[in-house]
Image: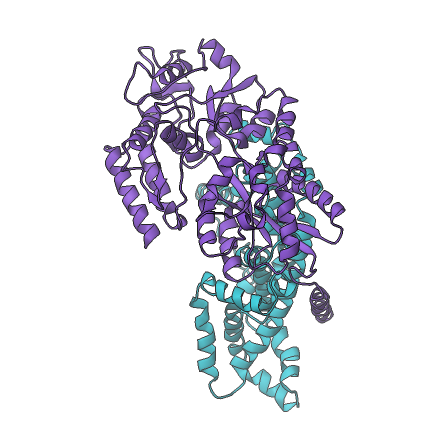
Amino acid sequence: MKRSISTLVTVGLTLGLAACSGTGDGGDDNTVTFRIWSDDAVAAAYEQSFAEFTAQNPDITVQINQVPWANYWDKLRADLSGGGGDDIFWVNAPNYASYADNGNLVNISELLPDAVSDWEPSAVEKYTRDGSLWGVPQLIDGGKVLYYNKKLVSDAEVDLADLTWDPSNEQADTFLQALKKLTVDSAGRTADQPGFDPGAVTQYGFNAAWDFDAIVGNFIASNGGLYQDSGKYVFADDPASVDAIEYAVDLINDDHVAPSSADTNDNLDFSRDQFLQGKLAVFESGAYNLANISEGADFEWGITPIPAGPSGRIPVTNSIIAAGNSASENSEATQKVLDWIGSEEGSEPLGANGALIPAVTGAQQSYFDFWASKGVDATLFPAGVQNGVLKNDPVPGAQAASADLDSAFKEIFSGRVGDIQEALKEAQDNANEQISG
Amino acid sequence: MVATLEKTGVGADQEIRPRRRTLVLDVITYTVLVVSSLLVLGPFLLSTMTSLKSSKQFAAEPATSFPSPLTADSYVGLIQGNYGFGRSILVTAVVSLVIVVGQTVFSVFAAYAFARLEFPGRDFLFWAYLSTLMVPGVVTMIPLYLLLSESGLRNTFWALVLPFVFGSPYAIFLLRQHFLSLPTDLISAARLDGAGHLRILWHVVVPLSKPVVSTLAVITAVTHWNSFLWPLIITSGDRWQVITVATANLQTQFNGNWTLVMAATTIAIVPLLALFVAFHKTIVSSLTIKGFN
């Protein structure tokens, strides 16, 4: 026993001493660190891109660091406030504003003024603040589409092209009429037939739920409403937004064409899994689910544009930029990498693996080619933003309000709230207080 | 824990209880035991089952359904994929080992000093140190982060180890209380024989404290094997990634990747299980009250 303890102590200390020979971060002057949130497919694509970059610039290597998505923003804030952080890091629209205001990000309008025209205009606009662009757009979502189960739709004899929805005019609401035909109960009755039993639904028509990106934001935008504006939340003050949100809530609780919020509120994968099991006819989502559906569906499926609201077919769109760290000690090499990832050559591997659409317009063809080879017309995604997108000015400090806002909306979508307008007003005022306080 | 019934002394006739009462009691006892073990073991069973499912089956069927087909795809994918998982196991093992060794050694020294040495301010220092147990870890995390950043130790092995290797208030408290309970006669006898403090520690105190020290070592090993938040913020990238961070990295923004995550957690449990199996006798014996023979 004594001998094994002393051996253990010796081994432990030796290992410790040996390990201390490791260098800290950024030890090599010519290693540029590049931080993304956890996504294996994208990391592999970037590695391909950077291998080419190092072949052209042999004295610079790029190291990709993945941080778990769930903890990305906490770690970023801790690192940046400690004066550290990677040389280049991913940021998205809801979160970049406070970093830009604090001077943590490199001004791309000054650094790469000629390259701006190569990038997707909606992404450039989204990340322009105080007249300057604060990152190199990397990936865009395009618009949203309706994924549909071909067999279920043809069985119900429904045509998904040119559907319109309208919260105030039932006759013009061809979308709801179609969804009712696609919702079937255990006795085989559809939702528009008498005797339909909402408690025994075996097939749902649509995936209405509290999911801002996939559902709610698109309804708000297509009705001409706003969710946030000028740095605060305005969804309750804008009647168009209130109507849109009420419409979505009614789809679940009054019309019964969507699964209960008890299933969808806390599990965003629920609707997608129902669709993959063939129990959901129409699934509204974005390009981020294209790979999942392509791999997971063992039935014939297709995509079609989202229904048009009173203001047209206007979706929410998201994008990701790679921002330079203004506190980086390696600024020259970092600038070269930023230039590379904003170029067509650097972005092409991102599109070629089909995960998301590159923001560099010249590199987008590789994405379309990849999906064309699988029989999917992915040009529908960028085409979706041609009529405009939801104008979503960033709200600095949004994280402070996000938890309460989330639970308020979950309550509203559960159908237990009597006066939706009042509940929205309360949630909005509460959130605005939290972000300013 | 098995309670052993010792046969009482000579000539003791065992009472013959009516069979029915024993049977009912047995049935109740076993039912309670089975239900409790299912409740405790259930999550582990579920996670192992999930790790053996294909991701398609996981998406299509309820989580409690049995894997069919039974597939090791998640394990293969974990090892073959570019997740840096193998390296993270190595890093976590070395970090845990260094912390356990360091913390045990330094806690024993400190506890001995607080228990058996006399110096001015001893008790005040002890209680002040103990009171730091009341401070939640997250409060000290940012100052510690800044401290290590300024020292240039961010994203190094020492950053993972230094805050913990010099002892923990919990360990020092437990050991000090145990050392206080040791009979002073033994220590005085050793001192009369001319032993210095180190000798007393090595030959008298530590041999008598084996169960407590082993239990503390196991608790420390488990705590640091599972630690997540500190390694997350102080390290970046593949080089010094620990198991918990590597497992969290398996989940993307839109994909839970649950079968892969469950495979990772199942692999992560195995070394701890091995540790428990190796040390379970000492852990159990430390829970029973033993007098000196």
Where in the figure is residue A374, as x and y percent of width and height?
64, 22
> In the picture provided, is A379 more to the left or to the right than B239?
left
Q: Does the image show residue B257?
A: no
State how the image is colored.
by chain
Q: Does the image show residue A115?
A: yes
Which residue is at 44% across, 44% downward?
A: A94
Which residue is at 65% across, 82% downward?
A: B198
> In the picture provided, is B156 more to the left or to the right than A264?
right
Where in the figure is residue B87, as x and y percent of width and height?
69, 52
> In the picture provided, is A5 more to the left or to the right than A131?
right
State the cyan chain.
B
Quarter holding the N terminus of chain A? bottom right
Front in this rendered view, residue B199 or A133: A133
Instruction: Determine whether A151 is above or below A406 in the image.
Output: above
Residue that protrudes farthest toward the front in the picture: A114
Instruction: Determine whether B230 is above or below A128 in the image.
Output: below
State the purple chain.
A
> Dividing the picture into quarters, in which one does residue A314 lie?
top left
Front in this rendered view, residue A282 or A220: A220
Front in this rendered view, residue A241 or B121: A241
Count of all numbered marks drawn on residues in the image: 0
Which residue is at 40% across, 27% downward?
A: A208
Instruction: Determine whether A372 is above or below B261 in the image.
Output: above
> Dividing the picture into quarters, in which one does residue B116 lie?
bottom right
Quarter holding the C terminus of chain A? bottom left
Instruction: Determine whether B60 is above or below B138 in the image.
Output: above
Front in this rendered view, residue B114 or B182: B114
Where in the figure is residue B36, as x and y percent of width and height?
48, 45
Where in the figure is residue A258, as x and y percent of width and height?
39, 24
